[in-house]
Image: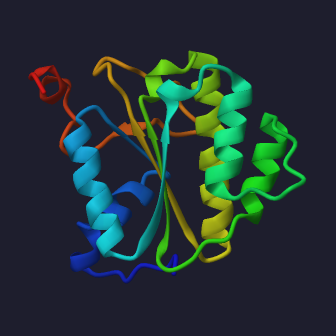
Amino acid sequence: MAVFRNHLTEWHNHDWTILRNGSISVYWRQEYLNSDIEWFQKEKYNVVRFDCATWTNEDKMHQDLYDKLKLPDYYGSNYDALDECLEDIEIKDTGLIIAFEHFDHLQKDIRQILLDIFDRASRFHLLMGNRVINLIQVDNPDTEFEPIKAYNINWNRREWYTADRKQSK
């Protein structure tokens, strides 16, 4: 299902606008994230949500990733194993949305590692004809990310400008 038609009607869809620049879109406002997730669900995407604020240590994070993503039994609960096992997850229907809420509660180095791993998994699955999109929700509108590989992590279309994130929720 990874192929899009070269048609104006698809160029404005959420999946197209995210995947044309990478696999990750960042949100500050929870209602924008929820609205986009509803759109993805209507389009027959499967959605897996993570509350990163509950990850008090890396063991809890790896256990949550293992449980919700249904990683294989041989998952070694470390970043290298996560990187490898994400290639083995089954993508059904239109694709998979992975939503990380309260992502800025994680340490910056852990955030960057996860972004790199999940972006690489998305690119792998695109090559196999499947869509994996990563949605990142942060509580601080000033949160910034280091580039992954050769491109920047982008804010969603409604909060693209800093001024749009300075308004009260």
From the viewer's side, name the closer residue of 26 and 68.
68
Q: Quadrant of residue 79?
A: top right
Compared to residue 59, the image places residue 87 above or below, namely: below
Q: Is residue 55 visible?
A: yes
Q: Quadrant of residue 86?
A: bottom right
Residue placed at 29% from the left, 73% from the top? 42
From the viewer's side, name the closer residue of 22 and 78.
78
Judged left or right of residue 151, residue 160 is left
Q: Position of residue 162 (x, y in %)?
A: 20, 24
Q: Position of residue 127 (x, y in %)?
A: 66, 70
Q: Quadrant of the C terminus?
A: top left
Q: Position of residue 119 (x, y in %)?
A: 59, 48
**Scheme by which the image is coloured:** rainbow
Q: Is residue 145 visible?
A: no
Judged left or right of residue 72, residue 39 is left
Compared to residue 104, the image places residue 83 above or below, namely: below
Q: Position of residue 118 (x, y in %)?
A: 62, 46
From the viewer's side, name the closer residue of 86 and 34.
34
Residue placed at 43% from the left, 70% from the top? 45
Judged left or right of residue 161, residue 47 is right
Compared to residue 86, the image places residue 89 above or below, namely: below
Compared to residue 107, the image places residue 78 above or below, namely: below
Q: Residue furthest left?
A: 167
Residue placed at 79% from the left, 54% from the top? 85
Residue placed at 65% from the left, 66% from the top? 125
How many numbered discs sit on the rendered protein? 0
Judged left or right of residue 168, residue 132 is right
